[in-house]
Image (spheres, rainbow, N blue to C red):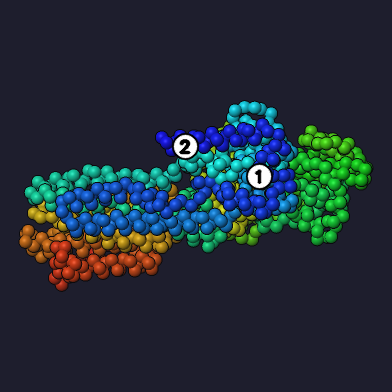
Amino acid sequence: MKKTMTKLRNEQEVNRTLLQDSTANKDAVLAKYKSQIQGLSDLEAQTRENKYGKNITAEQKPTPWYINLAKSCNDPFIYILAILTIISYLTADIEATIIMSIMILFSVFLSFTQSMRAQKASLSLKNMIENTTAIIRDGIQKEIPIHDVVPGDIVFLSTGDIIPADARILEAKDLFINQSPLTGESIPIEKFTEASEKSLSIFERDNLAFMGTDVISGQGKAIILQTGDKTVFGSLSQEALTKREATSFDKGVKSISKLLMYFMLVMVPIVFLINGILKGNWTEALLFAVAVAVGLTPEMLPMIVNTNLAKGAIRMAKKKVIIKELSAIQNLGAMTVLCTDKTGTLTKDKVELIEHIDTTGKTCNKVLALAFQNSHFQTGWKNIMDHAIISHMQKIGDDKRYTQPEKIDEIPFDFARRRLSVILQKRDSVQMITKGAITEMFSICSTLDENGAIIELTDTIKAQLHEKCEQMNRQGMRVIAIATKSKANQETFSVQDEANMTLIGFLGFLDPAKPSAKPAIESLTNHGVDVKVLTGDNEIVAQTICKQVGIPADKFLLGSDIDFMYDDELTEATRTHHIFAKLTPTQKSRIIQLIREDGQTVGFMGDGINDAPALRKADVGISVDTAADITKDASSIILLEKSLTILNDAVIEGRNVFGNILKYMKMTASSNFGNVFSVLVASAFLPFLPMLSIHLLLQNLMYDLSQLTLPWDKMDESFLKKPRKWDPKNMLRFIITIGPVSSIFDILTFAIMWFVFSANTVAEQALFQSGWFVVGLLTQTLVVHMIRTEKIPFIESRAAAPVMISTLIVMGIGIIIPFTSLGHSIGLVSLPLSYFPWLIAILVGYMITVQIVKTAYIKKFRDWI
């Protein structure tokens, strides 16, 4: 309660400060934070960073070691082991108490170590994809990491930027900010220099911007008010901001844990009662039941899961794939549909300006010059075509002569208008230069320049020009238009001024298909991933590229078509279409949402600021480290190189990680299930305990040790061939089918020890227990190799070297223990040499039987791991 009240007071203090700064005039705010429009000095910024700390919130900071330790202890299986340890201690079973204490310490230590390693790896990977912001320091504009921003800093805001901290707007030009991460409101909010509302809600103050939100369009300047935990974002609870819906895998891990606990709750009392009633020693029966409970406890499960995810993330990093969220690895392996943009993924991402032509189709330097000035003077996020224009002009050495005019204003790009304008002062005139998509540019042009003559832009001429652009599209070129008009000098310009313009010409850009794209798409398809293209480009260019890389290109849907389709119609279309062109960001999100609702696991790969909504909507958001900050922030996976080949490798690695976790869960669950039946049979028919509690505990500890190397194992190619999801029906079916096989050979062992070796009296129980101890440990350890592959183990498929070595070591120790003083001290005896031919026969028979059952299982259910 005290903690809640403190948190509430902190939130109220943050809100009160922001409201005060919202109502004050700009000069007063600058004075309050001892700043100026030219920004802070580097020295002053460093002083403030020392005072206020880094601009990071609590959930971005490394979790302290003691918190990780507490989390490692906070596991239901650890609680069960602790209770059982206490029971053993109270019943004076010191040996069992020691072994269970070792198991608890061992499990907690490994889980803690792996969580710390995973955290370290995750932080180091995140540091490779640092977001930056543009600020003024010492009067100079520079880019710095967001975590270095301090109160009083003056920041520049433009399309695609993430707001680095809570700020007061000082300048704004068509500045629209997406506040949905904080408010849930999907409609962007326009920001101004003064608050038009005096509402008590800080989110309705339209001259405030908040950490974690992002710029949809426009530009502006702001002064930083609060950083880190002092921001609205930071003051909210970590759970509210970071809690994600549990994946099917998370639910699967919980379900198998619950299943084993139910087994324990039902079977352990039965074992206790049977042994107590039939053998009359209730204390011994209790200790044996406790040991059975321990045997049913998969105390290594958290460690196995964490280790697999951490190792998978590190292996992916070596392949230029950065995992921001470890849970994304499983979703990557489960991905059935990959939606991707076109540029840079299917193409070389080296856009070159190929043509700059006038309205008659002739090469025209005036078109190039106007395009260069538009790209050069715009202050927003420059896309690849802007860079291509600037680069082309720099190559021919004419860039300097066109940078002389004074820029008066700018109308930033947005995805509704799909165009951008700059307004320049040229000698005695003011000229607006606009470039953008063909259809959108035609809608604002009333005339065109034809060989120097200004004529009306009629529908007939528009149709002719459209045909020319489509010819360029069919050659693989992306085409944009350039238009201008002279304006009277005025203070500000708006979208309404983009009207009655004169069309000057067109620019054609070529971004050829990557040679690696076709084999990568073929590999993804062979691995069960359907690739679809979602692009803002037109359908002709998209079809041309898709044909070159092997994506079905016979059908396409346009954004204009999608707007008039009901959800069920569009869902049906997503099953048959692979090209969706001329899409808005909202349309991309809608398509991804419908594919997900259709039962698919969807990945989306994009790097444009228009891709951020779709990235957030996908099961797996994939971007590149050169993308806009908003795009990287919306992604769970970052590629250091934009390549489908790298992504294909990452998909396979994700399936490998998931497969190794499934192995442990299926091995443990089926083995424990079989052991329960073996114990019940033995308890009902033997005049003594089949094994002492200490034997079961030692056996379980050694088995756990042999499993620690599973994260280093590999999956068969057949497993990697298709997407993998958690399937609870398959898990239960597997347990019921494979578990009893071990019981058959346990019972066979009972019969051999009883009839062949005459270990059928209380006086000979140690020999019986020693014989089953060795068989139980070896079959439980060997089954790892039987279950890990659907092939014939050791012949067609061999485990990784660490798994082979750990298996041999544990099996060797298991055979030796009955002959040692340690074995003798816990009630085991040396086994006769005549026992070992029977042991070999049991092991060989067990492996053959499991292989037969496995083959029949795969044939019937067409599935294994």
Name the one closer to the observer, 200 or 172: 200
Which amino acid, mark 1?
Gly
Which amino acid, mark 2?
Thr
Residue 754: image quadrant is: bottom left
Horizontal arrangement in the rendering, residue 853 relative to residue 153 (left or right): left
Q: Please state the horizontal and vertical placement of residue 7, each as a whole percent of the image.
A: 48, 37
Q: Check disc 2: other Cα within 10 Å, few if <14, some if 14-19, many if 20+.
A: few
Horizontal arrangement in the rendering, residue 811 relative to residue 330 (left or right): left
Q: Please state the horizontal and vertical placement of residue 763, each as a whole percent of the image.
A: 6, 61
Residue wearing tag 1? 152
Gap between marks 1 and 2 measured at Cα: 26 Å
Name the one closer to the observer, 571 or 60: 60
Q: Please state the horizontal and vertical placement of residue 544, each as a whole percent of the image.
A: 68, 51
- Label 2 sits on a secondary structure element that is helix
- Label 1 sits on a secondary structure element that is loop
Q: Please state the horizontal and vertical placement of residue 266, each as a whole percent of the image.
A: 22, 43
Residue found at x 49% / y 58%: 121
Image mark for residue 6: 2
On-image quarter of the N terminus = top left
On-image quarter of the C terminus = bottom left
Residue found at x 28% / y 57%: 103
Residue found at x 72% / y 38%: 27
Residue 626: image quadrant is: bottom right
Residue 728: image quadrant is: top left
Residue 643 appears anywhere in the view: no
Q: Reply above or below: 101 against 813.
A: above
Q: Are marks 1 and 2 in contact (CB under 8 Å)?
A: no
Name the one closer to the observer, 407 or 233: 233
Q: Check disc 1: other Cα within 10 Å, few if <14, some if 14-19, many if 20+.
A: many
Image mark for residue 718: none
Residue found at x 85% / y 56%: 400
